[in-house]
Image: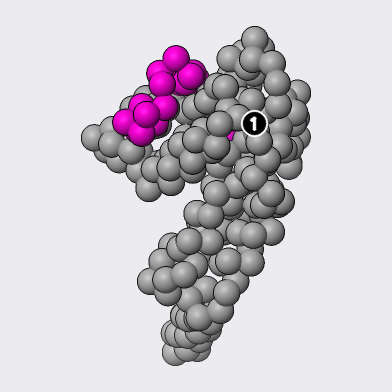
Amino acid sequence: MKRLLRGVVRILFYSMAALGLVWTLATVTPIDYHWATWLAGPWDDPAADVLIVLGGSVLDDGTIGQSSYWRSVYAVRAFREGDVRTVVICGRRASVAMREFLESQSVPRSAIRIENRSSSTRENALFAREVLADEPGRKVLLTSDYHMFRARRVFQKAGIDVLPRPIPDVRKQAGSWRARWPAFLDLVEETIKIGYYFARGWI
């Protein structure tokens, strides 16, 4: 019994030590910033005829969440550059709230189309394909830095040729040590999703 107890204590000790090491790595080093930068790909902000914006988080009351907010902010900035003819917002929960934000920033409703059936990145691409069928021109995909690796490849797999326009989501959070641990967990979760999508042949 004592041997078993010592074994359990040893496992707990090493587990806590490992967790502490990972937490220190995530909060003290720039790993979040570099990891997100690698997942984002090119940062050349290509001009778009059609800007595809992927929905992110939404609060329980339907209010726009943090990731959706920042994607919307950068969508407005892209629209104001003057090249974007149409903004297509994807996502069952976030698309309406994001459209309202864009309209509040003087993006005309006539320039916004929403795809409000999808609830995953793969569905974003599959349902957006129908919306984009009658939208000619250069298509640019806008989403969070850590999400771009998977999102771009999902759209390409669905037959939609897109150029990446990532936004600094985790890269922003990496500037505050308090935000680095949640950002690190987002990166871990996203990497697991990438592996799952590869296994399913979706990317």
Q: Position of residue 3 (x, y in %)?
A: 50, 88
At a point 58% along the width and 14% down the height, the residue shown is: 131
What residue is pinned by disc 1?
48
State left or right for residue 150 relative to residue 180: right
**In the rendered image of this protein, does residue 154 appear above or below residue 21?**
above
- Report crowding for label 1: few under 14, some 14 to 19, many 20 or more residues within 10 A (C-alpha): many
Q: Is residue 102 magenta?
A: yes
Q: Position of residue 38 (x, y in %)?
A: 69, 59
User: Which region is colored magenta?
Assistant: 101-123
Q: Position of residue 195 (x, y in %)?
A: 69, 48
- Farthest residue to the top: give it: 134
For this rendering, which residue is in front, 181 or 199? 181
- Please state, as top left, top right, bottom left or bottom right, where the C terminus lies in the image: top right
SS at badge 1: loop
| Disc 1 residue type (three-letter) | Ala
Residue 196 visible, this angle? no
Q: Quadrant of residue 181?
A: bottom left
For this rendering, which residue is in front, 77 or 96? 77
